[in-house]
Amino acid sequence: MKNRLYGLLALLAGTLLLGTGCSDDESGRTLLAAKTNLTLAKYCNAEDGLTSVVWKKGEQAALVAEGPGRTESVFAEPILPGTERSLFLFNVTAPRGPVAVAAWWPADAQVTCEDGVLKTSIPAAQDGTVSPILLVGHTTGVVNSYEGVDMELSQLGCTMYIRLIQNSYKVTRAVIEANGGEMIGGEVSVRMTDWNVTASAPQVTVTPAVPVDCAAGGQTLVALLAPVDLSSGYTVTLYDGDTEVDKLVDNTPVRLAQGGKVDTAEAEKLPTQLLFCGNNTACVIEVGSEPPADYRDAVVWRWDSRSVAPVLGISESQCRVGEGKPVDNNRKLLLSGATGWCVLYDRQTDGILWWSTSCPQVHSSDLLPNDRVVLACSSGADANCNKVQVYDLGQNNKVLCQYDLESAHGVVWNESTQRLYAIGGKSLKIYKLKNWESDTPELEEERTVETPKNSVHDLTAVNSHSLCIAGKSAYVYNTASGTFSELAHFSACTALKSVNYNEDTGEAWYTDATVPEGDQDWATQTLRHTSNVKNGEADLLIRIPDLSVYKVRVLRW
């Protein structure tokens, strides 16, 4: 060990002597030997921990000294590999006096230096993997002094851990922006003299490779942001597809420190969004912790079903709408009326993408794979009543195939089980898709399950393995075990028309015509909510006095 140190000192002395013999350029800069100690700091990783790194034999660090114009970086290998801190010997063009210097690892990172400004990037589009890793350090000193210079290299960016609350949605992307308008990503410039950092992008968007399912709780998304000060904090907007599902807001000043981390504020819950239909109207309202005094003050979208009469070739009097089912991440709605029509409506364009009038007494609908749609047509005298029908979205009003189901009232496609579930009377039918890639697709009945009570009226998906069946009382059906569990809150209800159950929170929104309201014996003029399906109390009521409502659906919990 002693001989090794003598050898290193001799090498250093020889290198320093060589440096003193080089001539100055016009700016007073000359080729100097720089004795430099570099320490690799731990950096925040995507697993909410710290990653330690050591200098490896044969790998390099990069160093640059402030200067006019474009300054090329120089490279050297660690003298003491296998440690976090090592001595390096660089040959760098610099003045003999104090000068700002910077070093980084990995040496091949995309970093340039021009007129004393380091330039690199922190991507404005990220995938949640905390990359690229770039550890950077800086100091001001006399590079060829006996003491040399010393730097700790830390992650240039600040890591933000986006804490997701337990909820029924999935997060497909998160958009981060500064409330004060500061730039937080993109091209990053660092002035070497005072280490002032600026960026070019006002937003950083994190799109994970796989959507984050928030049902389990405790999920985290990770972003890398430019190390800047946020005068008014930040906002993180969470999306499920194109639908905004939550916001995380911190309005206090926040410092995004180099190599540091920030944990987001708790999610600011967005108002619940409800879709309901009655008479000639479909509405979306937003509901906070208190019900609106007048539901019309909470309306954010309204649709007059009579507007489709010319498209369907029917009279306006036939355009009464009973159900609206959100599909395609709420971007589209399947809207239908028991008078015998159904349309696929695009919320973004206000356009009709598909329609049918061959569906008498249609009570429910859903999308199927390969751009197909399924309808449930209930009891009536028409030959197409008491049927489950399949259509192709490329062909309006053409039934591809249909199957008997007495008093068909509900259909739900389950992507996880690759099965179609349909209810009617006292039956739950389970279908497989057959010849689905052909022009003559079929539904193959796999089995029929008897429901606990007759007169089932509504079928909704709870999660990937559960369905809610409602009519006389309400039950959760487990698709894996084939068992039913009663929801006690609804035990006295004899005419439930819709139930939307959130298993994660224990709450439900529903319509109940046990005591009819409005102009029909199957209608209600009240949207009901319970925060606990195990008790017998509705804790929130929203009156709809001018409509006879059939079903309600939750667009956002």
Image (cartoon, rainbow, N blue to C red):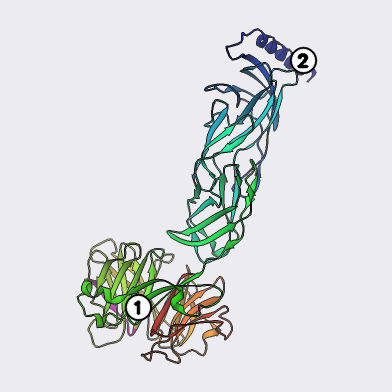
Indicate the amino acid at tag 2: Tyr
Numbered circle sitting on residue 6: 2
Please state the extent of the stretch shown in magenta in the rendering.
Answer: 399-407
Q: Is residue 557 visible?
A: no
472 or 223: which is nearer to us?
223
| Residue 163 painted magenta | no
Residue 201: x and y, percent?
A: 49, 43
**In the picture, residue 506 is in which quadrant?**
bottom right
60 or 194: nearer the eye?
194
Q: Which residue is mark 1?
A: 281
Of the residues under marks 1 and 2, which one precedes in the sequence? 2
Instruction: Give, as a three-letter code, the residue at label 1.
Output: Thr
The N terminus - image quarter:
top right
Question: What percent of the width, then of the height, locates residue 107?
Answer: 57, 28
Residue at left offset 49%, top offset 89%: 493
Residue 341 shows which numbered tag? none
